[in-house]
Image (tube, rainbow, N blue to C red):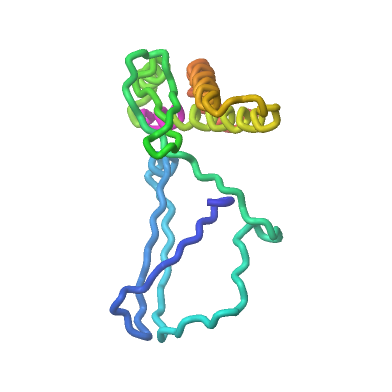
Amino acid sequence: MWTGRFAANVRLPWNAKPGDRINVTVTVEDVQTQMRNSPFISSFVLVAEKEQGPRRPGGPASKPHGRPGNQTSAPTLATPNLKWREFDRTDVALRISHDPNGDLEYFANEKNSYLTDAIVRGKEEEHALIKFWFGYGLLLCALGMIKQQQERNEESNEADRRDDDDESTEADDFGRVGFYCDGIARVIIPLIRTLYRGPQS
């Protein structure tokens, strides 16, 4: 998504013939539309045309997708997948580690005391939304802290560091981020709830 726009390629059925008209309906839901029970619905008609031959090599190159009036491509804003786990300690909120492929994994504690307290106090229809606020609110905070720490590490002089020190340094960074997220967990749900309501004046 970029400013509410989403691009998608739609293929005709394999047995479509020229002149066939296919009605298509796309339904998009998120947390807010689920609460309102009012998803975004877009309907359109695909019209089959005669199949075209392959494009000749050396044709005009496709332009990069970006914001209107800007030749640079739009930044990638993909949010990592958040996984839920039951931690032994209820004061733990979020932990970060590497999967077997070396990619980062983010685990939120569904038994965190501040999360469970907010769910108990909240309305039943808000439980899923509260959990979403908690998990992804902390995830966004963690991503910001990790990015900032990576930039600081790149700017600092690390010429004398040994290769075997890099992993422990990264683990220390992740540990600090997790520790800070434990503190942010105290206020993340009330803060997002206030922002969710919008300006009060």
Where does the C terminus fall, quadrant-wise? top right
Where residue 90 appears, x then y in whole percent?
A: 37, 14
Asked if one can make out residue 178 in the rendered structure from this viewpoint, the answer is yes
Where residue 106 appears, x then y in whole percent?
A: 43, 31
Q: Is residue 174 left or right of residue 127?
A: right
For residue 77: magenta?
no
Residue 66 picture quarter: bottom right
Q: Which residues are magenta?
A: 126-134
Residue drawn where x is 33% and y is 26% of the image: 85
Residue drawn where x is 39% and y is 80% of the image: 48
Where residue 105 appears, x then y in whole percent?
A: 42, 33
Where residue 103 appears, x then y in whole percent?
A: 44, 38
> Closest to the observer: 97 or 90?
97
Give the total number of marks visible in the rendering: 0
Asked if one can make out residue 193 in the rendered structure from this viewpoint, the answer is no
> Closest to the observer: 155 or 55?
155
